[in-house]
């Protein structure tokens, strides 16, 4: 009991510290812009993280969910003049609808085939978005109004980055909470069992396809909510949302720190975007860095930077303590994507 | 609409798709590697050919050879990087790593060649052939013949040569290949180098048709993904037929229905095929046929 209370206090302390982070870092516009971007893109990455870490699949269509959220927000506010809350509801519904269609289509595909089909779906979405006038075509949709989430007398509006920070931060905290709860929920546990041992899951009376679909829907909502906020922050949506850059950012963010670590995608995204903001090498240089980081992580330490931690500890302590690695290794084991043993199945 | 001209266009585009796809097909068949960096390798091939002509003034054929050589080197670099993942057959990680590789190539090319569009000037692009109601350029004719030669050569090499037998063995079972006394990593090196060389060759032949940009990797090559997957994983003849079929489909769909939605239509077809016949993706037995 005291243990969980201590954890709660620590989480509350970290959350408060996180909120003050831009002030602690000097509070310049660049700091605010960067941290807002980190919060939004980290929230986006958690959508993919749920699929990658808990379902063990790699979805390449999550940029489309992110874009769906952004496009829904843009269309509802600009074309139809609705408020931000309606836009959020619309973004969630649109993402659920798209995820339902894609989820049903991809239900029977696994691993390799799942990734290929989701990639193809992302290309279709992108092609449709850049040609359908309703979605703004190749010009996109401009003139999204400032964020206004006022409820009755409580005024909640945001224009500039500093004003935007509380909203982006809140979205991030909410996303973290949802992912945390999900991992402890019946659905989260079931998803892990379906991933790790499908036969056992079936024997326990779990419907694997149903669970996969539910997790897919949840992940789409997470990414779409991030897209919704991104539309307001940028005041513009366009087909660039579908670019491979966002996909690679998401994947690298999730993989960089390590899979199935709650703060992993946040740390990964923070590292990548901080480099882009504070140590930028120009647009091309940043692309090069992002690509090299992804290749290096997967080729050198496929389990992410966190997997190096036991090794570092192993260096500093005596080898006699090497047993202490085993719990860490056991933790890491379910996170590994199983190699395709079904090569010739 | 000039149906005959559309058919000719379709055949030419189809051969272009097939030629761009050939290296990827072999790579996918033999190493199970979905190379999302293929488009960026295509872009590098086109830019190297352009750079050789622009910087040294050497003629186009020399530029083609230079692009092919550099492409082979790039493929070899890829093999060095991805060897561990290839050997452990961690297919999905391999797929992601190629996405990163592509990003890195695009960034590097942007730094090296700049953001401006360029033209890879082939002298054959200016010469055209008129046959009754249809016309095409000499470049197109070279492209079609080269594609047929490459496919025929690859097919024969895989089936009639010792090297082809080794490649098929690696595709079937890398561990067994080791027992057979062959160095699997050497064979992978050859396969990756072929992928790099083939896509650079394709780029040098196809790129003169349009201006080239360092950001073109995705758009120019996205159809190749369909050719490779729809052709049946690793099937050489399959990807030739798929390339031709998709070329004709895009030409006719573009002329009759809507040029803008061609990509969406082709990918929707692909999704339907993959979902309805998931067995086609498991690839056992279809390699090298």
Image (cartoon, coloured by chain):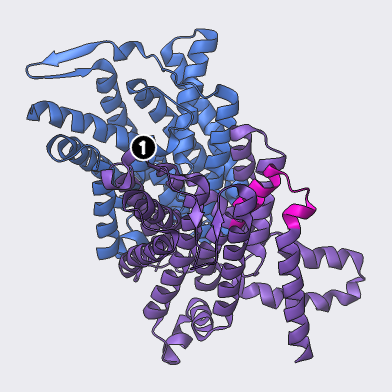
Chain colours: A purple, B blue
- Is A287 left or right of A123, judged from the image as shown? right
Secondary structure, magenta segment, majority class: helix
For the point 46% across and 86% down, which residue is it? A201
For the point 54% across and 27% down, which residue is it? B70
Counting from the top left corner in percent of width and height, residue B107 is at 57, 34
Examine the rendered structure and indicate whether residue B19 appears above or below residue A211. Answer: above
Residue farthest top in this picture: B57
Number of numbered callouts drawn: 1
Counting from the top left corner in percent of width and height, residue B85 is at 58, 55
Examine the rendered structure and indicate whether residue B85 appears above or below residue B5. Answer: below
Q: Is residue B33 visible?
A: yes
Residue farthest right in this picture: A318
For the point 36% across and 24% down, which residue is it? B205
- Is A38 left or right of A114, judged from the image as shown? right
Seen from the viewer's position, the closer of residues A23 and A100 is A23
Q: Quadrant of residue A66?
A: bottom left
Q: Is residue B182 visible?
A: no
Q: SS of the residue at dot 1?
A: helix
Examine the rendered structure and indicate whether residue A213 appears above or below residue B110. Answer: below
Seen from the viewer's position, the closer of residues B2 and B10 is B2
Examine the rendered structure and indicate whether residue B204 appears above or below residue B223. Answer: above
Q: Is residue B139 magenta?
A: no
Give the quadrant of the C terminus of chain A. Answer: bottom left
The residue wearing badge 1 is A139
Numbered range of the magenta stretch: A21-39
């Amino acid at each position: 009991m005291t243990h969980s209370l201590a954890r709660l206090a620590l989480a509350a302390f970290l959350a408060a510290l996180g909120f003050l982070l831009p002030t602690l870092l000097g509070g310049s516009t660049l700091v605010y812009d960067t941290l807002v971007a980190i919060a939004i893109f980290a929230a986006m990455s958690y959508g993919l993280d749920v699929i990658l870490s808990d379902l063990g699949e790699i979805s390449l269509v999550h940029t489309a969910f992110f874009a769906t959220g952004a496009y829904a927000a843009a269309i509802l506010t600009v074309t139809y003049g609705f408020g931000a809350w309606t836009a959020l509801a619309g973004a969630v519904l649109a993402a659920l609808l798209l995820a339902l269609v894609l989820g049903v289509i991809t239900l029977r595909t696994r691993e390799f085939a799942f990734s290929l089909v989701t990639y193809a779906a992302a290309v279709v979405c992108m092609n449709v978005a850049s040609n359908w006038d309703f979605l703004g075509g190749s010009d996109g949709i401009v003139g999204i109004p400032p964020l206004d989430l006022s409820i009755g007398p409580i005024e909640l509006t945001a224009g500039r980055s500093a004003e935007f920070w509380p909203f982006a931060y809140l979205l991030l905290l909410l996303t973290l909470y949802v992912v945390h709860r999900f991992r402890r929920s019946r659905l989260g546990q079931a998803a892990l069992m379906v991933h790790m041992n499908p036969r056992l899951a079936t024997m326990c009376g779990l419907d694997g396809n149903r669970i996969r679909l539910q997790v897919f829907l949840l992940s789409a909502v997470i990414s779409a909510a991030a897209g919704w906020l991104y539309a307001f922050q940028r005041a513009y949506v366009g087909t660039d949302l579908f670019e491979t850059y966002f996909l690679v950012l998401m994947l690298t963010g999730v993989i960089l720190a390590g899979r199935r670590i709650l703060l992993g995608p946040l740390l990964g995204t923070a590292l990548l975007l901080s480099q882009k903001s504070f140590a930028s090498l120009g647009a091309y240089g940043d692309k090069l860095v992002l690509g090299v980081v992804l290749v290096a992580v997967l080729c050198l330490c496929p389990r992410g930077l966190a997997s190096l931690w036991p090794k570092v500890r192993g260096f500093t302590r005596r080898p006699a303590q090497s047993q202490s690695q085993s719990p860490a290794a056991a933790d890491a084991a379910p996170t590994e994507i199983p190699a395709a043993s079904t090569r010739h199945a | 609409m000039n149906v005959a001209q559309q058919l000719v266009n379709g055949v030419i585009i189809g051969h272009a798709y097939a030629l761009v796809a050939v290296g990827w097909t072999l790579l996918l068949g033999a190493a199970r590697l979905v190379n999302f960096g293929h488009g960026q390798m295509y872009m590098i091939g086109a830019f190297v050919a352009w750079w050789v002509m622009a910087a040294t003034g050497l003629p186009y054929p020399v530029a083609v050879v230079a692009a092919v050589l550099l492409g082979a080197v790039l493929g070899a670099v890829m093999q060095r990087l991805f060897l561990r993942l290839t050997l452990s057959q961690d297919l999905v990680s391999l797929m992601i790593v190629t996405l990163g590789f592509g990003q890195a190539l695009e960034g590097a090319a942007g730094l090296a060649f700049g953001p401006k569009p360029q033209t890879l000037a082939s002298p054959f692009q200016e010469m055209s052939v008129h046959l009754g109601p249809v016309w095409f350029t000499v470049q197109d004719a070279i492209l079609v013949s080269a594609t047929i030669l490459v496919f025929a050569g690859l097919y024969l090499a895989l089936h009639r040569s010792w090297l082809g037998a080794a490649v098929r063995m690696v595709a079937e079972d890398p561990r067994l290949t080791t027992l057979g006394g062959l160095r699997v990593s050497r064979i992978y090196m050859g396969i990756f180098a072929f992928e790099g060389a083939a896509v650079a060759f394709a780029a040098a032949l196809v790129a003169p048709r349009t201006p080239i940009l360092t950001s073109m990797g995705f758009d120019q090559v996205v159809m190749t993904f369909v050719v490779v997957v729809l052709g049946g994983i690793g099937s050489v003849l399959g990807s030739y037929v798929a390339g031709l079929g998709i070329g004709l489909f895009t030409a006719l769909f573009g002329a009759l229905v809507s040029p803008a939605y061609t990509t969406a239509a082709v990918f929707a077809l692909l999704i339907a095929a993959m979902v309805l016949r998931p067995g086609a993706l498991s690839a056992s037995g279809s390699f090298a046929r």
